[in-house]
Image (cartoon, rainbow, N blue to C red):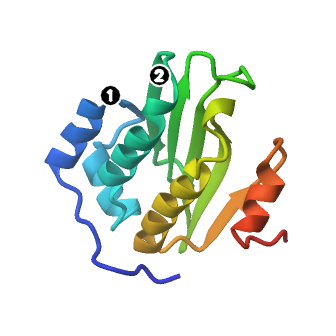
Amino acid sequence: MMPTGNPHIVTAEDIAEVEAIGFNITSDKTPLKDFLLTYFPGFDLREYLKEIDELLTPLTQAKIEKELAYFEEPPPMIIVQFYSEDEGNDQTGLALSRTFIKRDDEFIAEHDFFRIPVTAREQGIGKKMLNLSLQQYLRLGVDKIVLEAALADGGYVWAKAFFNAT
């Protein structure tokens, strides 16, 4: 897919803001700014992470961990994880994991995991998360979204969003 809209050019200020939001950034070598410009041009990672933080932080009183890892080893990838200390609790846990992969000329977004507390369900949070993700996917030119809808509401949620199993 060709990227749409105005491509974002990542800056040092973007990276500083990602760190200010509280994301722990880990990598094997290349500075994040250079990595994004090389492998994921147009991806407004700062905006994406800021929107995730603003949407999900109010859903829990538990301590939240925010992780961003990126790797150049083929294939280049970015892993975003946002989770509460009680992430494994089906009732109160909050967890999000996304992986972005650049394989040859194909961009892949993997929806690894998403859980919100029971008290926050059926309030449109999943739809908002999907919308903010799709906006970035269009900017980046994501060719494929990979997901497994194995949790309690997963199949229903994705079917409502007009995703088809392949």
As measured in the structure, the alpha-carbon distance from the residue carrying label 2 to the one carrying label 1 is 9 Å
- Residue 106 quadrant: bottom right
Give left or right: position of 90 versus 104. right
Q: Is residue 166 above or below residue 132?
A: below
Q: Is residue 106 above or below residue 12?
A: below
Name the quarter where the C terminus is drawn: bottom right
Q: Residue at image x 53%, y 70%?
A: 142
Are dots 2 and 1 in contact, CB under 8 Å?
yes
**Label 1: few (<14), some (14–19) or many (≥20) C-alpha neighbours in 10 Å:** some
Residue 22 tag number = 1
Give left or right: position of 156 versus 4. right
In percent of width and height, residue 50 lies at 34, 45
Q: Is residue 23 above or below residue 45?
A: above
In percent of width and height, residue 143 lies at 59, 74
User: Is residue 35 visible from the viewing direction of this image?
Assistant: no
- Residue 70 quadrant: top left
Residue type at mark 1 is Gly
Along the line of sight, the residue nearer the viewer: 91 or 104: 91
Q: Which residue is mark 2?
A: 64
Q: Residue at image x 27%, y 77%?
A: 6
Residue type at mark 2 is Ile
Along the line of sight, the residue nearer the viewer: 112 or 92: 92
